[in-house]
Amino acid sequence: MERLSVSEREKLLHELHGYMAWVGAEIPYVFEIDGTEIPLHELVWRLINKKELTEAETIGIESLIRALEEKEACDETALAKETTTREEAECLYKEASGLLRAIMDLKGIENEAHPDKDICRKVLQKKIRDARGLIKFVDDVV
């Protein structure tokens, strides 16, 4: 198995720390918390489309964000190891960017619940639209 070079590893880590690393990433379908698998993709989708959140759901979102952030940090740590193969690195990167996507979506839901943060959400949505437009433009040109 081919090991990842230092420059390749640094590039992947740099990309993960980029502002839009999670744009276009797929949220993992299943996520394990304390030995229990949850349908993360479905859960995030359901919460995004919900009109109002209960207090319990808001607390649950906060807990889920913390768990996702911990797992994403573990993926980054594993990605930084010199013994990482190219295949392992690709899997770790894909999972980490998907977790970042879930985190950003959940934070968006959380911010939406607070009207004073509505402007931040709209600015972020515009940036996402702009980034997607740029990606589409580049794909069309290439």
Image (tube, rainbow, N blue to C red):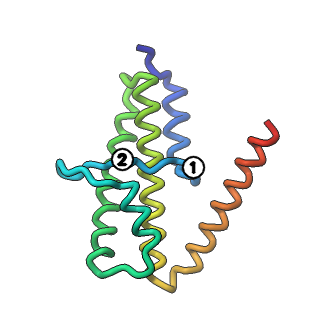
Mark count:
2
Residue 101 place in picture, x, y as percent: 48, 54
Is residue 88 depicted above or below 16 in this figure? Answer: above
Residue 19 place in picture, x, y as percent: 57, 54
Mark 2 surroundings within 10 Å by alpha-carbon count, few (fewer than 14), some (14 through 19), many (20 or more): some
- Give the left or right position of residue 102, taking residue 137 as reference: left
- For image coordinates 50% across by 44% down, the residue present is 16
- For image coordinates 40% across by 28% down, the residue present is 88
Residue that sits furthest to the top in the current view = 1
Q: Could you tell me if residue 72 is visible in this image?
A: yes
Q: Can you identify the residue that label 1 sits on?
A: 24
> Which residue is nearer to you in this view: 26 or 126?
26
- Look at label 1 and name its amino acid: Gly
- Look at label 2 and name its amino acid: Ala
- For image coordinates 46% across by 39% down, the residue present is 94
**Label 2's element?**
helix
**Label 1's element?**
loop
Q: Which mark is residue 47?
A: none
- For image coordinates 33% across by 68% down, the residue present is 61
Sequence-first disc among 1 and 2: 1
Instruction: Estimate the spatial distance between the alpha carbons at disc 1 and disc 2, rounded to whole Å.
Output: 20 Å
Residue 129 place in picture, x, y as percent: 67, 61
Q: Could you tell me if residue 18 is visible in this image?
A: no
Mark 1 surroundings within 10 Å by alpha-carbon count, few (fewer than 14), some (14 through 19), many (20 or more): some
Q: Can you identify the residue that label 2 sits on?
A: 73
Is residue 84 depicted above or below 48 in this figure? Answer: above
